[in-house]
Image (spheres, grey):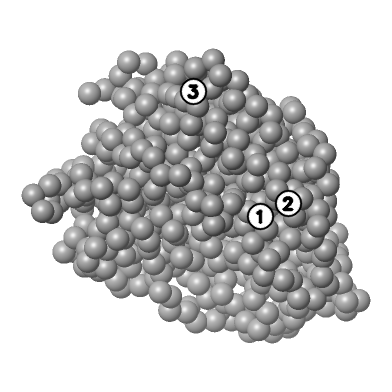
């Protein structure tokens, strides 16, 4: 059977990278499952694999095109990192950290500074991001690392800890205290070239042992009277906190690519096992409970993918709303994928725990261990929910008013629409227009209702969409009634934030399906198999809404029917055809004996 696959440019770029990396099931390949398992067992950094990614040009995608790189589309970076993370999260996290370390310069640095950094990254420099400290964790405003002004620059003292690539990085983008006025303006960013410091200006701290991503360089660096030139300052003095918060709006969305890659790997392992394994005289995949778990997990992954697609495009199309988009995405996608991986582990049973070559190089237990750290990177779950809670007064007003940036919404949800170039000046710490996506939910539901009335989609899809709208209408009332507290945030506020994120996810799925259903059908063709089946009649959308309703309306679960069961044959077909289990699949290089 032939499969047409997607015509989406970002996915095609990822497919090309996958082909160049070769079959990960071929133990002789550099970037193979076997090699990654061996490196993990030895807790060894994947030096050669990262070097291969350098040769294949991945660092160029971390550098904006304006500075000589190929970064003109953040959705392209998302899909490339997903392709790397599908093979191994340790590699993706280790290599992708350079983007995280450099992004503050793309967001807040001068053109000259950005050009110099771009040249270094394109030449192979590894960049780390020095934000957190041993005693303060995510509380960046409590940071104690100091950068005191001198005649020629700054004298840096203090320690940054639990920093990715702190030892291996050539450069470190350091958040340091440059004043003591008692506010966010006390901090500045310095792009420090460690190779020019010399000892004892800095010393590397020992790498810590980790449960997951064992081969990554998670360590720290200590500065003692380190002399840093004035040219290292990124932006204006005192702008460090603002630049970091704006940069996190990008990196938190990009972290979703790590979760999707992990989900791809886990789905492949669990569903493949269920198709091969027999129990009680039947294939495991034929047993009702197994089918249910596979259907739930696949629906969750497709929902996570829908959120990631829309949020990734929002970097360009709804830039001013990223304060809410990034917090929702960073909370929702890793949480959903963690739950799916746990469920898929139940399908595998004891094989989910094997850590050697007995079953598929111990891949499942590795991906489960590795993925747990994704929810901690760039602000953990509570940090991102808290970010939403802080925005409740504004979000409540905008949700009630249903204001929408129509052009931005169209750009974020229509995969065929050309994206504007990313404009860093449109980044804002406050999403003044709220979330156009969630505020447009009612419009999307009305459109689905009309399609159900003329028989284009099943009535059950419209009923689920209407139930989502009713739940979000109730949420809007509760948000408006919420009163911010200056000290202790009540647990109920976090529940509201979780429901807000679920509403965003439902609206992302609805608008993504509405804007792309015609193109998906046209591109599918007669040989497209599961692609046509997923989009036809809104099947994947209905399954996603069935899953999200339980989050939006706790205690009132969605009625059981066969919508999730109907997904399983399409998952099976994608896996047997060797394609990515995705809304926009493409052929994978896999399956060597």
Q: Quadrant of residue 577?
A: top left
3D distance between C-alphas at marks 2 and 1:
6 Å
Provide the residue designation for mark 1. 327
Above or below for 36 versus 456: below
Q: Quadrant of residue 569?
A: top left
Dot 2 crowding, Cα within 10 Å, few <14, some 14–19, many 20+: many
Find out whether the residues at labels 3 and 2 contact each other: C-beta distance under 8 Å: no
The percent position of residue 560, horizontal first and vertical second, equals 41, 44
The percent position of residue 314, horizontal first and vertical second, equals 66, 39
Q: Nearer the viewer, residue 538 or 344?
A: 538
Q: Nearer the viewer, residue 12 or 330?
A: 330
Provide the residue designation for mark 2. 323
Q: Secondary structure at mark 2?
A: helix
Instruction: In the displayed orientation, state which residue is furthest to the left.
Output: 281
Dot 1 crowding, Cα within 10 Å, few <14, some 14–19, many 20+: many
The percent position of residue 184, horizontal first and vertical second, equals 84, 68
The numbered disc on residue 457 is: 3
Q: Residue at x 59, y 81 (%)?
A: 203
Q: Secondary structure at mark 3?
A: loop
Q: Nearer the viewer, residue 33 or 488?
A: 488
Dot 3 crowding, Cα within 10 Å, few <14, some 14–19, many 20+: some
Asked whether residue 378 appears in the rendered view, the answer is yes
**Mark 1 or mark 3, earlier in chain:** 1
Above or below for 185 versus 49: below
């Amino acid at each position: 059977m032939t499969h047409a696959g997607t015509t989406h440019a970002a996915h095609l770029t990822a497919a090309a990278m996958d082909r160049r990396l070769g079959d990960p099931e071929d133990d002789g390949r550099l970037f193979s499952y076997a090699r990654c398992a061996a490196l993990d067992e030895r807790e060894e950094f994947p030096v050669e694999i990262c070097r291969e990614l350098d040769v294949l040009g991945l660092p160029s995608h971390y550098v904006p095109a304006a500075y000589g790189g190929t970064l003109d589309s953040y959705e392209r970076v998302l899909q490339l990192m997903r392709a790397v993370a599908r093979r191994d999260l340790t590699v993706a996290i280790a290599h992708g950290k350079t983007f995280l370390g450099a992004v503050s310069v793309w967001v807040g640095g001068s053109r000259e500074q950005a050009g110099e950094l771009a040249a270094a990254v394109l030449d192979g420099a590894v960049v780390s991001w020095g934000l957190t400290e041993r005693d303060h964790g995510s509380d960046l405003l409590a940071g104690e690392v100091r950068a005191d002004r001198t005649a020629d620059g700054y004298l840096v003292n203090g320690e940054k800890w639990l920093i990715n690539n702190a030892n291996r990085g050539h450069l470190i983008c350091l958040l340091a205290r440059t004043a003591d006025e008692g506010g966010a303006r006390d901090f500045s960013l310095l792009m420090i070239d460690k190779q020019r410091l010399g000892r004892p200006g800095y010393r590397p701290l020992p790498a810590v042992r980790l449960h997951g991503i064992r081969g990554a360089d998670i360590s720290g660096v200590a500065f003692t009277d380190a002399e840093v030139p004035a040219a290292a300052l990124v932006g204006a003095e005192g702008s460090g906190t603002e630049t970091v918060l704006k940069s996190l709006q990008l990196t938190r969305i990009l972290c979703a690519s790590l979760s999707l890659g992990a989900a791809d790997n886990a789905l492949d392992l669990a569903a493949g096992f269920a198709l091969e394994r027999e129990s009680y005289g039947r294939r495991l995949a034929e047993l009702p409970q197994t089918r249910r778990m596979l259907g739930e997990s696949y629906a969750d992954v497709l929902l996570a993918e829908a959120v990631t697609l829309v949020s990734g495009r929002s970097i360009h199309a709804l830039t001013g709303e990223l304060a809410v988009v990034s917090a929702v995405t960073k909370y929702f996608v890793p949480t959903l994928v963690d739950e799916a991986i746990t469920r898929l582990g139940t399908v595998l049973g004891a094989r989910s725990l094997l850590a050697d070559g007995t079953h598929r190089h111990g891949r499942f237990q590795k991906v489960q261990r590795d993925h747990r750290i994704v929810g901690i990177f760039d602000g953990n779950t509570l940090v991102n929910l808290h970010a939403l809670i802080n925005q409740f007064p504004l979000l409540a007003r905008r949700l009630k008013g249903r204001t929408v940036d129509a052009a931005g919404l169209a750009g974020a949800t229509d995969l065929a629409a050309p994206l504007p170039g990313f404009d860093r000046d449109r980044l804002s710490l406050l999403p003044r227009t709220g979330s156009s996506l969630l505020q447009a939910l009612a419009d999307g539901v009305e459109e689905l209702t009309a399609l159900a009335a003329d028989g284009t989609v099943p009535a059950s899809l419209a009923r689920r969409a209407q139930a989502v709208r009713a739940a979000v209408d109730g949420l809007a009332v509760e948000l408006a009634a919420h009163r911010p507290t200056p000290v202790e945030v009540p647990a109920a506020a976090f529940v509201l934030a979780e429901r807000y994120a679920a509403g965003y996810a439902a609206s992302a799925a609805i608008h993504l399906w509405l804007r792309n259903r015609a193109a998906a059908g046209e591109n599918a063709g007669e040989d497209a198999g599961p692609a046509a089946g997923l989009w036809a009649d809104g099947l994947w959308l209905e399954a996603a809404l069935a899953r999200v309703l339980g989050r939006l309306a706790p205690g009132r679960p969605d009625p059981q029917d066969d919508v999730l069961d109907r997904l399983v044959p399409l998952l099976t077909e994608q896996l047997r055809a060797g394609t990515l289990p995705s809304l926009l699949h493409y052929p994978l290089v896999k399956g060597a004996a």
